[in-house]
């Protein structure tokens, strides 16, 4: 026995994942074996569509001889979607050839298939075990960055390879999701002018004050701050704090926020949402973090992926500063 | 601090790609992987100080081809040639900024050798109490409240800190949330419990999970949660069970989400955009510090008050740090009780 300092090796994940992988293989083999009777199999691939938590078998088949009609039934469970397309010419023939059975499984009608034409059959199944992909792939993103760089690394790696190679000729993991928690709070804090903070403080105090005299004093203080903001001139109907805050909220919308994000190497940007912080109460608060969803793919030629997410905080800060310049 | 080298992937003679992060939060996991041509037979030695980092997982290597001696991991063969992956975990060190050297030596069957030497920076927050006045005066003159001394703190580390000021029972001050927030919480919690009771009746198989979830949400909203390892583990377990239940049953997911949304919508009108932004700004202190209960109000009675509590500190990976004890006598020079928000007690130094 080798001392591996208590480290977990691939074999433990293999033991865990093998029963489900076996079922996946059985489903694919069942379809391929049935097709083999009437067609030659030109290629096959198993793809895990990760966000959908489903597996997809893609099988290319070519008729051996003229087909005389009839149909073939495939009794496989948990079918989510079936499609058949001719490859040359590229054409979806699903509506003519496929019947998904209400009791499970599907049928392919041969009469609408032509001889010597390669076809692509794609069958998607639900993955029964919710955490199955996590047994196959390790994923990690950097939780916090050094303030000077604001670059987050992301990494994915297969927990084992040999079982996949032995059982499947082609296997792919598509669109593995990563949530990168990009911190924005420091940037917002540092660019908000002190005069605005003071104005905000007075408005908040005014809102919660019930004493008429004190409320009146706060109103006067607010007017003084407004005059100071407008260089001592007359107060006009300018932009209100609310209007400014609404514009500030827009910066956190995905279409704007994504302009500050750059994703490199094996990963790509998918979406971004306001960060849900488990420690922050669910008030209508402002995001201290934005969750950027990035994705990557793995296969047997690329069993591990690496990527970086750069947050261009200088541009983000400039955008906020610009907003305040137009307000103050 | 010297410039970091962000170039991670090297394409020298033997290795096609190498991922080795340049920095990570202390107490968190970090992966390393190497990819090379499948036709090439190699062996790898990784030299890493096990006194500083823990080896957690190794992928694509069989036990018989693996040997660990002192600080070196020797790998002579792979289950499938061309790739190896590792997961390590750093510790939480006395220093808030630690550089750990890593040396990777790769030899192929033709006698070629490649050596890669790098350093990984492990950082963390480090909250230091710079000044803890034993006596403080709180004076009210008309509408102005002033405090002659503040509790001075600084985050001397590079990592973000989440800070929660928990007042001890020995204190003779009262801490509560601002009225608007209290009203929001009351309305939210009552509506949430009502709606969740309906969900419990519809899905009795998830009763235990829902009870745990209800406690979690109410604790979170009321701020009665504690930053402790046990509490976080317990809540993570509940959330994991809930996630599995959601995956099993989409209707259940919709009904639980509806109970939160409906509670939120019934209470949201109480809080205003301006108030919320003000709270947001006040919760942000200098040097990557977020005060979780910044807007909570502390009420001091006229005369002498004992303010005793502790600052609970956590980082973004959920690591918990030694709390900071705070004890000070607050003399109130006013005929009426004085209320000040938590953020006003502290001065965060740059």
Image: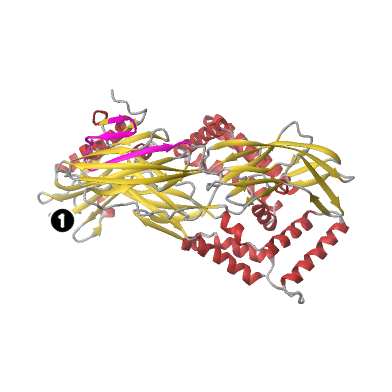
| Residue B252 point in image, percent of width and height | 51, 39
Q: Horizontal placement of A113 versus B225: left or right? A: left
Residue at 53%, 62% in the rendered image? A316
Q: Tell me if residue A134 can be seen.
A: yes
Q: Compared to B144, does B212 lie above or below?
A: above
Q: Residue A231 lies in what quarter of the image?
A: bottom right
Query: Which residue sits furthest left?
Result: A65
Q: Compared to A241, does B27 lie above or below?
A: above
Range drawn in magenta: B67-91
Q: Horizontal placement of B5 versus A281: left or right? A: left
| Residue B256 point in image, percent of width and height | 56, 41
| Residue B268 point in image, percent of width and height | 67, 51
- Comparing B196 with A298, the one in front is A298
- Comparing B50 with A220, the one in front is B50
Label 1 sits on a secondary structure element that is: loop
Q: Residues within 10 Å of mark 1 (few under 14, many from 20)?
A: some
- Comparing A258 with B294, the one in front is B294
Q: Compared to B77, does B12 lie above or below?
A: below
In which quadrant of the rendered image does the C terminus of chain A lie?
bottom right
Q: Tell me if residue A46 can be seen.
A: no
């Amino acid at each position: 026995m080798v001392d591996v300092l208590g480290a977990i090796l691939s074999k433990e994940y293999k033991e865990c994942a093998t029963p489900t992988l076996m079922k996946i293989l059985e489903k694919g083999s069942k379809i391929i074996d049935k097709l083999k009777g009437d067609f030659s199999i030109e290629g096959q691939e198993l793809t895990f569509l990760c966000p959908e938590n489903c597996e997809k078998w893609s099988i290319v088949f070519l008729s051996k001889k003229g087909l005389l009609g009839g149909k073939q039934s495939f009794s496989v469970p948990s079918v989510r979607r079936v499609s058949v397309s001719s490859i040359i010419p590229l054409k979806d023939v699903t509506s003519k050839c496929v019947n998904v059975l209400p009791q499970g499984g599907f049928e392919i009608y041969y009469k609408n298939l032509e001889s010597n034409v390669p076809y692509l059959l794609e069958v998607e199944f639900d993955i029964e075990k919710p955490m199955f992909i996590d047994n196959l792939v390790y994923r990690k993103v950097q939780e916090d960055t050094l303030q000077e760089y604001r670059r987050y690394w992301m990494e994915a790696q297969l927990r084992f390879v040999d079982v996949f190679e032995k059982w499947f000729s082609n296997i792919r993991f598509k669109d593995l999701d990563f949530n990168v928690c990009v911190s924005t709070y420091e940037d917002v804090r540092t660019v908000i002018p002190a005069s605005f903070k003071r104005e905000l403080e007075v408005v908040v105090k005014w809102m919660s004050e019930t004493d008429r005299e004190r409320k009146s004093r706060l109103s006067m203080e607010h007017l003084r701050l407004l005059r100071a903001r407008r260089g001592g001139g007359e107060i006009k109907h300018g932009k209100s704090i609310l209007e400014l805050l609404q514009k500030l909220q827009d910066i956190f919308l995905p279409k704007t926020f994504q302009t500050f994000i750059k994703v490199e190497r094996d990963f790509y940007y998918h979406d971004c949402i306001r960060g849900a912080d488990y420690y922050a109460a669910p008030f209508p608060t402002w995001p201290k973090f934005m969750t950027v969803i990035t994705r990557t793919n793995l296969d047997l030629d690329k069993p591990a992926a690496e990527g970086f997410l750069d947050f261009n905080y200088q541009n983000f800060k400039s955008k906020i500063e610009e907003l305040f310049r137009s307000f103050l | 601090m010297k410039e970091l080298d962000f170039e991670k992937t090297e394409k020298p003679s033997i290795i096609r790609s190498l991922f080795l992060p340049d920095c990570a939060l202390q107490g968190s996991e970090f992966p390393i992987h190497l990819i090379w041509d499948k036709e090439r037979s190699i062996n790898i030695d990784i030299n890493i100080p096990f006194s500083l980092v823990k080896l957690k997982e190794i992928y694509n290597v069989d036990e018989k081809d693996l040997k660990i001696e002192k600080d070196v991991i020797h790998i002579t063969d792979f289950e499938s040639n061309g790739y190896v992956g590792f997961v390590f975990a750093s510790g939480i060190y006395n220093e808030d900024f630690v550089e750990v050297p890593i040396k990777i030596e790769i030899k192929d069957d033709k006698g070629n050798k490649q050596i890669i030497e790098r350093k990984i920076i492990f950082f963390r927050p480090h909250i230091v109490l710079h000044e803890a006045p034993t006596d403080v005066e709180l004076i009210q003159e008309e509408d102005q409240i002033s405090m002659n001394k503040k509790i001075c703190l600084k985050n001397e580390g590079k990592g973000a800190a989440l800070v929660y000021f928990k007042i001890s029972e020995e204190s003779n001050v009262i801490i509560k949330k601002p009225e608007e927030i209290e009203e929001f919480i009351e309305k939210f919690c009552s509506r949430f419990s009502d709606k969740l009771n309906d969900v419990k009746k519809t899905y009795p198989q998830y009763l235990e999970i829902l009870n745990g979830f209800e406690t979690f949400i109410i604790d979170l909203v009321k701020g009665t949660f504690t930053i402790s390892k046990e509490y976080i583990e317990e809540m993570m377990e509940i959330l994991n069970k809930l996630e599995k239940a959601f995956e099993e049953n989409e209707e259940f997911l919709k009904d639980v989400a509806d109970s939160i949304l409906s509670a939120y919508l019934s209470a949201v009108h109480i809080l205003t955009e301006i108030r919320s932004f003000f709270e947001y700004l006040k919760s942000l202190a200098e040097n990557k510090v977020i005060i979780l209960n910044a807007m909570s109000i502390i009420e001091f009675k006229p005369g002498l008050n004992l303010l005793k509590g502790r600052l609970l500190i956590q980082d973004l990976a959920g690591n918990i740090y030694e709390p900071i004890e705070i004890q000070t006598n607050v003399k109130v020079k006013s005929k009426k009780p004085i209320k000040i928000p938590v953020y006003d007690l502290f001065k965060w130094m740059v």
